[in-house]
Every structure is written in structure tokens, then in C-alpha cells.
Image (cartoon, rainbow, N blue to C red):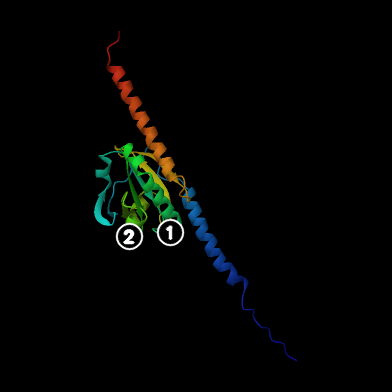
Amino acid sequence: MKYFYRRPRWSWMGIFVPLLGVLSFAGVVAWSSARAALPIGSTAPMFVAQASLAGKEFSFRLADALRKGPVVVYFYPAAFTRGCTIEAHDFAEAMDSYHKLGASVIGVSMDDIATLDRFSVSECHGKFPVASDPGGKIAQSYDSRMPVVHYASRTSYVIAPDGRIIFAYSALSPDEHVRRTLDAIRGWRAEQAGATKAAIQGMQPAP
């Protein structure tokens, strides 16, 4: 009697390869979120990008925004995903706090502008603009582009009016980005006020 070996419908390779893919993607995301962003004190790359505010498209120029005060540039993976939606809501709710500090916010993702037209209305509530970086060049210049996958990492920068990066924070979770960037701006404002006071005192004649 001959015995025939029947191959099982599954194999270790059939399980291992997809699992490896999932773990690799998770590793890329975790590595991208944990890695260092551009260093504090370095000059922020200037950029021009197509952006949307409340569904209305315009050309965003970082140099122009910095003339009005510090700017938060935050990168996020993709519009309408759970974490990015939460983050957009958080920034929208905090816009009054940013404005009181004389700061503005721009979100940047690799989504196309048509997607961001919708996202700026439904999730950003028309409170701040989001810019399209379809080729990932802006994210790359800010050391915020994930390797392999076509997404930016979740990274937030605070840029002073002189173009210096005064704060950088990378984390997969959206929870701390607003609080930390606001605290960074408050700290910078306090330093500016202290420096101004010291300069005034230094100009006063000695008794």
C-alpha cells in the first residue's frame, strides 16, 4: 500500500511571513516615533506647501507665518485615522491658547490636498490649516518621514520667529503633543520677557 503525504492547508511560512510584515511595520512606526527629531537650536527648513483651512486652499509659507510669531509644525501619519483625528481635535480645541501666546499651528501630512480639504473641515473644525506633502519632501527635511512606508511620523516642532527650533517631540500617541508644545511656547515667552527685562535694567544708569 502506498501512502501519500497530504500537505496541510497552512504552513509555518504562511503564518510567519504575514506576521513578520505586521511586526516590521509596527517596528518601523515605533522606531520612527522614538528616534530623535531635528536638534533643538538648529535652523528649521523653510517650506512652501499647498494647504487647506476650513476647506479653502491656499499656499502656506512658513517664512511668512514666522513673521507673526512662533509656529507649531506638527507632522502626522494620515488624515482620518484614529490617532490623527484625535490629535486634530486636540489642536483645534487648544487654538485659543496658541493665539493668546501669539503662536500659530500648521499640520503636515502626505495626504493629497483633496483629502485635506475634507479633513480641515470635519476634524480640524476650520481652526488651523493642514498642508499637503505628497512626496514627503517636507517630512524628510524635518527628519520626520518613516522609512519604507509612505507616512510621516507623529512629530511636533515649535519654531521661534528667528527660524530656530526651540522644541521637538516625537511620539506615536497623540495625547501629549498639544500640552508639550504649549508649555514650550510659554517657556520661550518667559525667557523672552526675562531677557527684555534684563536688557532694560542694563541700560539704566547706576545710582
Decide if residue 183 is on the left or right side of residue 21: left
Q: CA distance from mark 1 to mark 2?
A: 13 Å
For mark 1, does the 10 Å Cα neighbourhood hold few (<14), some (14 to 19), or many (20 or more) residues?
few
Kindly state the secondary structure of the residue where label 2 is placed: helix
Estimate the x, y position of residue 106 in percent, counting from the top left: 33, 48
Decide if residue 7 is on the left or right side of residue 81: right
Residue under the image location 40 percent in, 46 percent down: 156
The residue that mark 2 highlights is 118
**Furthest residue in direction right, as rendered:** 1
Question: In this view of the protein, which residue sits in the foreground, 178 or 36?
Answer: 178
User: Mark 2 belongs to which amino acid?
Assistant: Arg
Where's the N terminus, which quadrant? bottom right
Q: Can you say whether 43 is above or below 84 in the image?
A: above
Label total for image: 2
Where's the C terminus, which quadrant? top left
Q: Nearer the viewer, mark 1 or mark 2?
A: 2
In which quadrant of the rendered view does residue 145 lie? bottom left
Kindly state the secondary structure of the residue where label 1 is placed: loop
Question: In this view of the protein, which residue sits in the foreground, 160 or 146?
Answer: 160
Estimate the x, y position of residue 131 in percent, counting from the top left: 31, 54
The residue that mark 1 highlights is 81
In which quadrant of the rendered view does residue 80 lie? bottom left
User: Mark 1 belongs to which amino acid?
Assistant: Thr
In which quadrant of the rendered view does residue 189 lie? top left
